[in-house]
Amino acid sequence: MKLFQKLRYFIGGALTMALIGGAVTTAYAALTGKTIEVSTGVNVFVDDMPLKMDTEAFIYNGRTYLPVRSVSDAIGKPISWDSDTRSVYIGKHNGTEPIAWLWDLNTFTGINVTKQQSVIKDNLGNEHDNCIQGNFTNTYKINKQYSKISGTLFQTFGGRSEYGTSKLSIYGDGKLLYEATVQSGVEPIDFAVNLTGVNELKIQYNKSGQDYISAIADCGLWQ
């Protein structure tokens, strides 16, 4: 039992409902700014298999609240968040942004990537937000939820005179789908890779030389 746990209202902790029961504790609801009494210690099963949740389920006023991302994973539907309208979309949504950024996905193997907090310039001087840096080899169980992955691979402005190379390889169910390399003198490369019918996505991003010499921008998955 946890006392005064802070409930996070973002996609990973946005809420949906079911009916169950559990033990009592107190929580602070960040969205409304009030303290509420809830029950925790809830176990949830889908087809007799335990539901893996990154946020604890709880009961309030006779209803059990579950993290939406865990539910979407269980039913095999992608999830997206529209901050302008404060809306959660499960399943099909025709938006102008990817339905998920790469750093939103939990890895099956490897280490979750993180978004760089600063804007990064490419070797042409153009600025990019939503960037990833650092070597990684990750696999993701995407369960045929996405139609493509897209982004931009580029040599950074600060690393444009370096002699190192950066290689991006994308695999679907063990098959190489795409490969690209940037180094000094190579302009930014936009990529869009078809993921239709892919269950397991594998991404390798390997760099020789300094870590800062390249980056991947706007790496997102589309439905």
Image: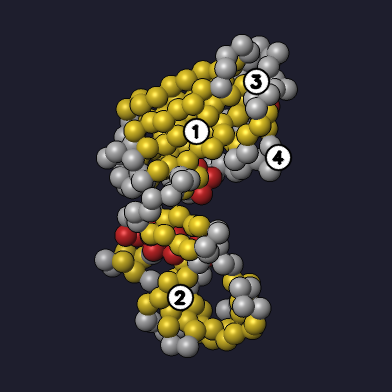
Tag shown at residue 16:
none
Extreme residue in the right direction? 158
- C-alpha gap between disc 4 and disc 3: 17 Å
Q: Which residue is mark 2?
A: 65
**43 w.r.t. 135: above or below:** below
**Which of pointers 2 and 1 lies earlier in the amino acid sequence?**
2
Which comes sooner in the sequence, label 4 or label 3? 4
Query: In the rendered view, does 157 fall on the left or right side of 17?
Result: right
- Amino acid at the residue labelled 4: Ser
User: Between 188 and 61, which is closer to the camera in this rendering?
Assistant: 188
Dot 2: element = strand
Residue behind mark 1: 151
| Residue 12, visible in the rendered structure | no
In what element is the residue under mark 1?
strand
Q: Nearer the viewer, mark 2 or mark 1?
A: 1
Q: Contact (CB < 8 A) between labels 4 and 2?
A: no
Mark 2 to mark 1 CA distance (whole Å) = 35 Å
Q: Which mark is residue 124?
A: 3
Mark 3 or 1, closer to the camera: 3
Element on which disc 4 rests: loop
How far is mark 3 from mark 2, CA to CA? 48 Å
> Gap between marks 4 and 1, in whole Å?
17 Å
* Quadrant of residue 194 within the rendered picture: top left
Q: At label 3, which amino acid type do we have?
A: Leu
Question: Which of label 4 and label 2 is nearer to you?
Answer: 4
Q: Position of residue 170 (x, y in %)?
A: 42, 29
